[in-house]
Image: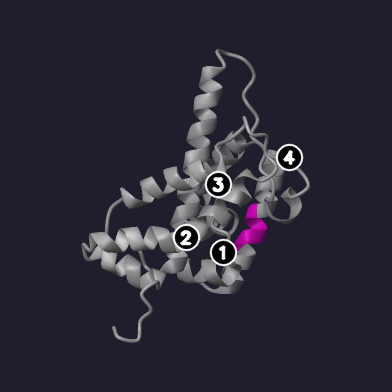
Amino acid sequence: MADERPGDITLLLRRMDAGDAAAQEVLYVTIQGQLRELANDFVRGQPAEATLGTTALVNEAYLRLAGGPEGEWKDRRHFFAVAAMAMRSVLVDHARRKRAAKRGGDMERVPLDGLAAPFEERAGDLLDLDEALDELAALHARVAKVVELRFFGGLTCAEAGKVLGVSTATVEREWEFARAWLRERLG
């Protein structure tokens, strides 16, 4: 272990899984900036009242991650993929609470800026996207996971392939299929 860096995320995740409580604090300090960048991608361009701010999103997502079951982190990429899914979950829960609070009015729209390629020019509704991804997961679980890793996790096709244990070409094909399916479903 002498050649491992103290801030190495994979090492910190392994130390956390082994029960090292101090590793969790070091991990948060180490990844806080990266989590903020990821959260910024989610909230960029949205009205302040539409969603949580970056800091609140990072904090809520990290609390979900830290409170989750131990021993499941494969590496840094896997952690950030799960972190992105936690952020999605936090945003969807927040949007649902806002909708429920409206007392029967129209559903609150939460635009998603930055959805890859064909979705970049159009803001979608977070709840509609979440529902569509649930439908896609029921039909093609791995394809839905590709969307989560690519869109919510910000992973490349190669990185997503490593997380899923499939080739980059498989991820690219499934990403193209998912984009077409989502375009049809959300269009």
First of labels 4, 1 by sequence position: 1
Would you say 77 lies left or right of 63 here? right
Would you say 57 lies left or right of 6 here? right
For disc 2, the marked residue is: 80
Q: Position of residue 71 (x, y in %)?
A: 27, 62
Which numbered circle lies on residue 155? Answer: 1
Would you say 39 lies left or right of 2 here? right
Q: Position of residue 97 (x, y in %)?
A: 49, 26
Which numbered circle lies on residue 187? Answer: 4
Residue under the point 50% across and 53% down:
84
Q: Is residue 104 above or below residue 84?
A: above
Q: CA distance from mark 4 to mark 1?
A: 25 Å
First of labels 3, 4 by sequence position: 3
**What kind of element bears circle 3?**
helix
**Three-letter amino acid code at the position of disc 1:** Leu
Question: Which residue ends up furthest to the left in the rendered image?
Answer: 19
Question: Of circles 2 and 1, which is in front?
Answer: 2
